[in-house]
Amino acid sequence: MQLDDHAEELASDLGVDKEEVTQDLENLVKYSVPIEEAKQSLRRKYGGGDGGSATPSSKNVADVTPDSGNVTVTVRVLTKGTRSIRYQGDDQTIREGELADETGKISYTAWTEFGFEPGDTVTIGNAGVREWDGKPELNLGESTTVALESETLDVPYDIGGDADLIDIESGQRGMNVEVEVVELEERTINGRDGETTILSGVVADETTRLLVTDWNPRPELAEGATLRLEDVYIREFRGSPSINLTEFTTTKPLDREVEVREDAPQLPIAEAVGSGGLFDVAVVGNVVAVRDGSGLIQRCPECNRVIQKGQCRSHGQVDGVDDLRVKAILDDGSDAVTVVLDRDITEEIYGGTMDDAMEAAREAMDQEVVADRIRERIVGREYRARGTLSVDEYGANLDATEFDETDDDPASRASDLLREVRA
Ligand SMILES: [Zn+2]
């Protein structure tokens, strides 16, 4: 639907002037407010309620859908995170997290402070429902009521937001982690208030490692520090979850060592892909194919993207920079991923340097000979790949930091498996 159609619909629903509604909508959308949220906000402004005329109905969490209209739910508060967002040009503090009853859990955004905390059982009346990331989410606004219940609701979920890094998922709010900072650097970015300095790096615990960003740099976050971070939010960065610290995040030094996991957790490919992306993971499988665009390639000097016949999609005719890479499809029977190997690892499996590869291409007058030799060397063999797995519209890709042929033969692996099964 176009903005104009949305305005038309709103104006007729609310019985107000379309011009006025259009202007309001344009304003909100200009500030990057999602259209559904903008419409809801205007329904409130013009007194049309949060989602139409239906009276709120009591529902189980599992039965709440974006079409539910306004709902009333009795739930346990699982998590509560605080964040400042820019809304209609102003900075506004919101609370967000997850709520649950016996039937399921649901995310929420609260536009005012209702005073509930993780662990509380509350009845939330007249909450709006919107769709967020394909799932229903409760929207707690000015017309929403929250009443504290004296009886505690038992729910089959963890309460309070404490989590191991391996269990962290994109979209989580109000989470607490205990980590060692293993890498950290200062970066200057163009933020919503112009140039600003942030900290970014890697944190680790006993289970795995994750990227971290501190949007409000604090001195306690330093390489080697072991900290409890309270109220962090998780967002997807390049296809895997990352930890984000805000002005509301608190840090406490830990009075214990964190035994940082040096190796990566090894998962079946289906499980790794099903997790929606992991910063550091290992998978084992057979190389079933080496994809086109492997071997000797040329990149755009401006944007680093791979180019075809000297043509960059963004920069037109450019002087390509030679590079080596491999995109290998690794399959373990449960699923498959594309493993992307950089120049260093590619030189290793090619068995020569990039100069050697260019020489071979010149002699054959065809750069495909490089990819062909790589195919001969790795297709049909079993490898263990470690790196960052991203799962998005480009599929499941693993950016490898390690890529090693497994040395155990199938017979000994079978007997290992038998031993495990019997144990
Ligand atoms: Zn380019």
Image (cartoon, grey):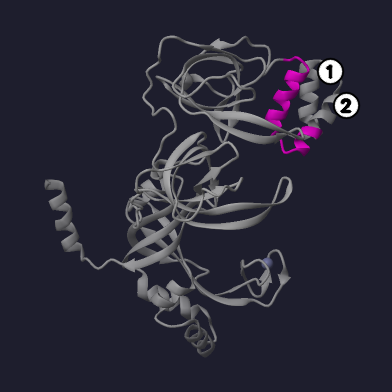
- Judging by the rendered image, the residue that carries numbered circle 2 is 19
Q: In the rendered image, is residue 103 in sight?
A: yes
Q: Which quadrant of the figure shows ligand 1?
A: bottom right
Alpha-carbon neighbours of circle 1 within 10 Å: few (<14), some, or many (≥20)?
few
Alpha-carbon neighbours of circle 2 within 10 Å: few (<14), some, or many (≥20)?
few
Q: Give the residue at x 37% y 75%.
A: 376
Give coordinates of residue 369: x percent, y percent. 47, 81
**In the image, what residue type sits under mark 1?**
Val
Give coordinates of residue 377: x percent, y percent. 36, 75
Relative depth, front residue between 267 and 171: 171
- Judging by the rendered image, the residue that carries numbered circle 1 is 16
Specify whether 154 is left or right of 243.
left
Instruction: Please state, as top left, top right, bottom left or bottom right, where the N terminus lies in the image.
Output: top right
Does any atom of ligand 1 lie closer than 8 Å to the CB of label 1? no
Query: What element does badge 1 sit on?
Result: loop
Stretch in magenta: 27-48
Query: What element does badge 2 sit on?
Result: helix
Q: Residue 56 is drawn in which quadrant?
A: top right
Give coordinates of residue 111: x percent, y percent. 64, 25
Q: In the rendered image, is residue 394 in sight?
A: no
**Residue 321 falls inside the magenta stretch:** no
Q: Give the residue at x 51% y 68%.
A: 292
Q: Residue 83 is drawn in which quadrant?
A: top right
Relative depth, front residue between 150 and 271: 150
**Above or below: residue 199 compared with residue 11:** below
